[in-house]
Image: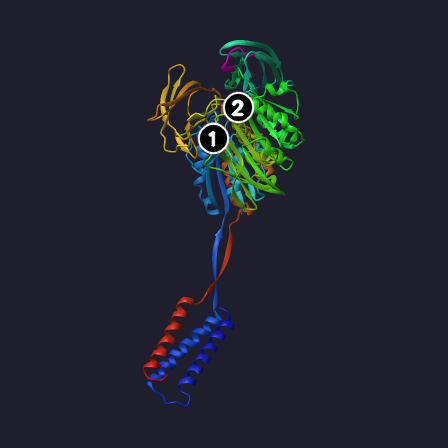
Amino acid sequence: MQTTTVVLIFLAAIFSFAFAWFQYFFKKKENRINKILAFLRFIMVFGLLVLLINPKFTKNNYSLEKSNLILAIDNSSSIASLEGDSIAKAIFNNLSKNMSLLERFDLATYSFGESLDDSDSLNFDKPITNIAKTLASINDIHRGGNSAIILLSDGNSTFGPDYEFETLNNDINIYPIVLGDTTTYEDIRISQVNSNKYAFLKNSYPLEVNIAYSGDRSIETPVRIFVENKEVYRELIKLNANQNNITVNTLLDASSVGIQNIRVQIDSINNEKNLGNNKKTIAIEVIDEKTNITIVSSIKHPDIGMLKKAIESNEQRVVNIIAPNSSKEILEDTDVFILYQPNRSFGETYNFIKNKRASIFTVTGLQTDWNFLNQIQNSFSKEVYNQSEAIVPVKNEAFSLFDISTISFAGYPPLKSNLGEILITKPFETIAYQKIKGVNLNEPLLLIFDDKDVKEATLFGEDIWKWRMQAYREDKGFDYFDNLISKTMLYLSDSNQKSRLELDYETIFNGSADMNLMAAYFDETYTFDSNANLILSLEKSDGVFSGERPMLLKTNSYEADLSGLEAGEYNFIVTVKDENLKKTGRFTVLDFDLESQFSSSNDKKLKRLAEKTGGELYYPSQLNSLIESLTSNLQYTPTQKNTKNVVSLIDFHWLLAIIVLALALEWFIRKYNGLL
């Protein structure tokens, strides 16, 4: 407490004493009652003065701040295949219990595969390695202060961006320890097989095979392609140390409808260690129909190209872009019309659509002729004011016509539209509501008309291309946004009545990827039923496996996890318990293990990562050198931190209570003794 405060308290005590003495003893007879009253007056005045002075004192709290030591170990199956699992466990246990490190650092331990896991349970069975995501997660968790990351890995990342170029905080240094065999073996491998996801019956589809060779001699080996175990293509290739990569291109015939398994295989070479990367299996779905979608627009806008790109990400759909009053031959072949910012030139197009009873997706914006649009159709209308607004989307979690759980509109940029009240005249469901200037409006921004006769969708805003860009920034890809557009097109192009049980699943699953089957169940009023009991029955085509598993409720859908299924073809039935309702389907799980594609550890890449972040690469035999380097590095010296807390010396509540009590007692005593 400061000297000035002490002096003020002392003076306050003298003043309070003098004030009480002057009132009760100056030229007055001294008695017992006056002494009590003088004491109470002293307490009251002194308390008030102390409240005004408000004495405080400073309290110093000292703490020892250590640097962070993050121990992250690769828990993927490639560690075991490269015979580094036992060494990895020994190093992990040694480092996590080393007293010299624990005295100098705050230790945090993680394991990782596809993502970061705070568990230190090591079984080396993760099917995917994503080192870039792991480093990004650690970077987000341990912000502030010096941090050292000990990365135990083979350096082989099978998913995500290149971790060598991951941007980290400047105060993070990485010290990789290389696990597994670093010896380079002679190896020939299929590095990539590219093909379309869908093909059309009686058409040819392209197949591209990239083959790489690691070695010093010249070799030749045949490349063979099998469709449903029948060899359909063979080519002899030659590779050497200089020409160590070749791409084989061919066209295959889509001769039958359904899922076709394609196996690409190359013969092994002498003394080759890793044979798991000598073959690769993919699958393609052959279909016998295609959805034709036509975008009609009289203006040029980035939205149009974006819609074409998003829709054609599904090879089942073809998009044509035409102006109003174009040839009727194109209109005749169209299944779904996208009318972009209609104006009076769309008159004949609307008449044709009405006669054909085709599905429509209307996109409006600043250049829409609302007088014309309000007259030409009767699904909605808008009273427009001559003022533009920026409209932010707000997701409707209760939307039930199809599953939209994979997309979130949070953070999406606003769309442009004219200010005005919207009137909807048909049954509809809203995908996204409008939010203007921070106010949530009960008006739809993107909606689907739930009409059994003619299906429609409407977007009340332009610049939707910005949404696709935002989706890429958030998810590092367009899949979630394109999936929303794809499901909208699927709903509009489906001529069948809405089913009470809808399924959403991939017909082809990569064995190393997440595998989920989703379903939506509606009651008799076509409202999503969250209390249903859905059961998934699985049976492998060869009859070896069969089983049942419940489908769990996830927001507005039910989901079954298919992870762990062996490669093969599966037939399934989704049944609603206590209801005479079921649906069947089929999917294929591919026999493909990303983690088995490597024959050695990638220590060169790990070394570049270490040098970039100011760390250093180590091998298991250099563990003691790593510990000595970390414990002697001045950068990680613990620092003493002093926190000053200014604390009030008095409790205002108690002091006020004492003042009030003293004043009340004084008044009561004076009143009782007739001194008032």
Kindly indicate the quadrant of the structure image that contains residue 606.
Answer: top right
Q: Residue at x 53, y 10 (%)?
A: 255
Residue 301 horizontal/vertical position (percent): 66, 32
Q: Tell me, yes or no, if residue 315 can be seen here.
A: no
Q: Secondary structure at mark 1?
A: loop
What is the span of residues highlighted in magenta in the rendered image?
Answer: 253-262
Task: Name the mark on residue 493.
Answer: 2
Q: Which residue is mark 1?
A: 403
Residue 566 horizontal/vertical position (percent): 42, 21
**SS assignment for the magenta stretch, majority:** strand
**Total numbered labels placed on residues in the image:** 2
Q: Tell me the colour scheme of the image.
A: rainbow
Q: Nearer the viewer, residue 619 or 345?
A: 345
Q: Amino acid at mark 1?
A: Asp
**Is 98 colored magenta in this rendering?**
no
Q: Amino acid at mark 2?
A: Ser
Q: Residue most toward the front? A: 375
Residue 311 horizontal/vertical position (percent): 57, 26
**Is 259 colored magenta in this rendering?**
yes
* In the rendered image, the vertical position of residue 162 relative to residue 139, given as above or below: above
Q: Residue at x 59, y 18 (%)?
A: 333
Q: Which label's residue is closer to the chain start, 1 or 2?
A: 1
Callout 2 environment at 10 Å: few (<14), some (14 to 19), or many (20+)? many
Residue 563 horizontal/vertical position (percent): 43, 26
Gap in Å between the C-alphas at discs 1 and 2?
Answer: 16 Å
Q: Secondary structure at mark 2?
A: helix
